[in-house]
């Protein structure tokens, strides 16, 4: 029996917390001790370079740099179907040249998409995602790219939607946008990696079956606290492909990574149970 503690690093966003609520609340029992560490996505991305955590959530734009030490866990992926990070501003003008654009981190998928679709010359300002709307409202920046709950509430703050980067991606590729997912370290045993995958799926199933029970935990970590916003976020990014990476989600990953010059192979880069039972 494995007795060492397994640390799982995740973001504060509702979809991550929703996936793991069954485990965090100890409704799903693990045969080994678990510890959960919360951080914003840029910090998680930086932590991932150190390969300190057995399981960690990261932006998919970073994975080609992490593939030596990590595989993508077959449960926990956030895919955008016509939706993704959004570009907003107080003005309705999309002229970015010589302006300041706030982004939720240099290593994020949001930054990759901005470079892909808007390669113009503008000043990038990297901020924790929850600081981007305040920076826009105080005019410290001219534009902002919103993720997590912010993308659902921008209108409350008088901000204008200029474009949805997920929609641009789907128009370009015809495939969903891979935003981020949980990675698991390659050097763990097969048995442990299978058990972690099984626990993730059991936890996600528990959350789906007990939405109201896990809501207080989601609210504890969310930046926007109203119930509708939290569950709108969960409903948008937690789906059947979160439970199991397959079909068009895998196709989206392959195309996404090809834009980064990286060849994604399921047998090398995806951790899935050998018999596909769980």
Image (cartoon, rainbow, N blue to C red):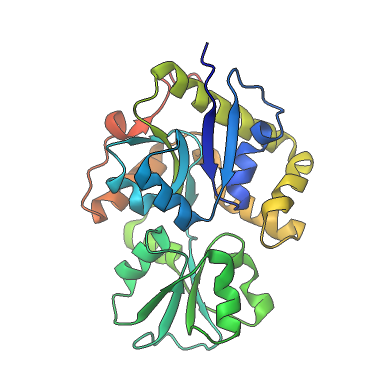
Across and down, in percent, residue 38 comes to 58, 47
Q: Is residue 179 visible?
A: no
Q: Is residue 147 left or right of residue 122?
A: right
212 shown above or below 200: below
20 in relation to 198, above or below: below
In the rendered image, residue 5, in percent from the top left (x then y), is placed at 54, 26
Query: Residue drawn 52% across and 21% down?
Result: 4
Q: Nearer the viewer, residue 260 or 132?
A: 132
Q: Is residue 95 visible?
A: yes
Q: Residue at x 62, y 61 (%)?
A: 149
Corner quadrant of residue 198: top right
Q: Nearer the viewer, residue 200 or 189?
A: 189
For residue 234, above or below residue 98: above
**Quarter assignment of residue 94:** bottom left
In this rendering, the answer to whether 116 lies above or below 219 is: below
Dividing the picture into quadrants, the one containing residue 165 is bottom left
Q: Is residue 269 left or right of residue 219?
A: left
Could you tell whether 223 is left or right of 57 in the image? right
* x, y percent for residue 108: 40, 59
């Amino acid at each position: 029996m494995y007795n060492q503690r397994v640390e799982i690093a995740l973001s504060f966003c509702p979809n991550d917390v929703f996936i793991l609520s069954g485990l965090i609340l100890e409704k799903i029992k693990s045969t080994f001790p678990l510890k959960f560490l919360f951080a914003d996505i840029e910090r998680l991305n930086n932590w991932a370079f150190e390969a300190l955590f057995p399981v960690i959530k990261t932006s998919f734009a970073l994975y080609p740099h992490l593939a030596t030490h990590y595989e993508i866990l077959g449960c926990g992926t956030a895919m955008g179907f016509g939706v993704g990070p959004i570009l907003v501003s107080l003005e309705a003008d999309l002229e970015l040249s010589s302006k300041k654009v706030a982004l939720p981190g240099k290593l994020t998928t949001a930054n990759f998409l901005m470079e892909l679709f808007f390669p113009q010359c503008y000043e990038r300002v990297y901020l924790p995602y929850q600081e981007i709307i305040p920076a826009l409202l105080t005019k410290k920046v001219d534009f902002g790219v919103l993720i997590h709950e912010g993308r659902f509430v921008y209108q409350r703050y008088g901000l204008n939607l200029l474009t949805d980067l997920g929609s641009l991606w789907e128009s370009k590729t015809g495939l969903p946008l891979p935003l981020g997912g949980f990675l698991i370290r390659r050097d763990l045993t097969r048995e442990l990696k299978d058990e972690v995958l099984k626990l993730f799926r059991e936890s996600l199933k528990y959350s789906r079956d007990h939405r109201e029970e896990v809501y207080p935990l989601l609210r504890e970590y969310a930046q926007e606290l109203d119930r509708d916003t939290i569950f709108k976020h969960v409903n948008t990014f937690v789906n059947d492909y979160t439970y199991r990476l397959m079909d068009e989600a895998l196709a989206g990953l392959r195309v996404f990574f090809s834009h980064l010059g990286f060849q994604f192979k399921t047998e090398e880069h995806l951790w899935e149970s050998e018999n596909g039972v769980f």
